[in-house]
Amino acid sequence: MPLQTLTQELARQIAADYPTLQSLNLSRNALNDVRHLKLLPRSLTQLDLGSNRLSLLPDELGTWIPELRLLRLRANALESLRPLVGCKQLQTLDVGANRVALVSELRFLQPLTQLRHLALDGNPLADAPTYRREVLGLLPQLQSLDGQEVTAAERLYWDIASPISETVDTRQFSITTE
């Protein structure tokens, strides 16, 4: 039977049995409450919460799991990326197939300077024609977006566009590769 809640008892048992736990897979359950993540070992570097029923994450996630480098949240019901702002060590984030609709939610990922790989495909915001350009403009450190490598042409665009973006509307420019 799938888990609906990461209970306090289960989280404490995991922490007691595996005090130096680095990777935890709780995917493919029916989780809608993960507030007891705070009881897990702080050594956790990889967490998979994909394919659950999460609509909210705890705001303190980054404080509770400070070493988190890989986080999978694909196929949930998340609308906001705000709780991820404190996950300072995050390098890989998969938040695809959720309900993130606003590009402004990406501002919560800007402090994550270690973030290199991001998946947002399957969210309403990914349907915008300028989606990729907007994401890379806000998160220029990315090496891949939605499983596709960030190209040299895309990087060149932002190297040129960023310094002039305060005085010129850069949406009028486009780069074509032959």
Image (cartoon, rainbow, N blue to C red):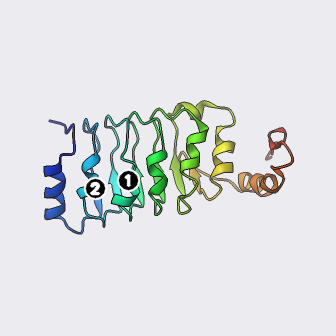
In-image side of 67 versus 146 (left or right): left
Residue 167 in the image: state x and y as whole percent: 86, 48
Disc 1 is placed on an element classified as loop
Which corner quadrant of the image does residue 65 belong to? bottom left
**Residue at image mark 1:** 60
**Residue at image mark 2:** 38
User: How many angstroms separate mark 2 from mark 1 (CA)?
Assistant: 8 Å
Residue occupying the point 19% across, 53% down: 11
Q: Amino acid at mark 1?
A: Glu
Dot 2 surroundings within 10 Å: few (below 14), some, or many (20 or more)? some
Quarter of the picture holding the N terminus: top left
Disc 2 is placed on an element classified as helix
Asked whether the residues under the numbered discs 2 and 1 touch, taking CB atoms below 8 Å apart as contact, a structural biologist would say yes
Residue 175 in the image: state x and y as whole percent: 80, 45
In-image side of 108 versus 19 (left or right): right
Residue 28 in the image: state x and y as whole percent: 27, 39
Residue occupying the point 20% across, 67% down: 19
Q: Amino acid at mark 2?
A: Lys
Dot 1 surroundings within 10 Å: few (below 14), some, or many (20 or more)? some
Which one is nearer the viewer's eye here, 86 or 163? Answer: 86
Above or below, comparing residue 159 to residue 145 in the picture: below
Which one is nearer the viewer's eye here, 149 or 103? Answer: 103
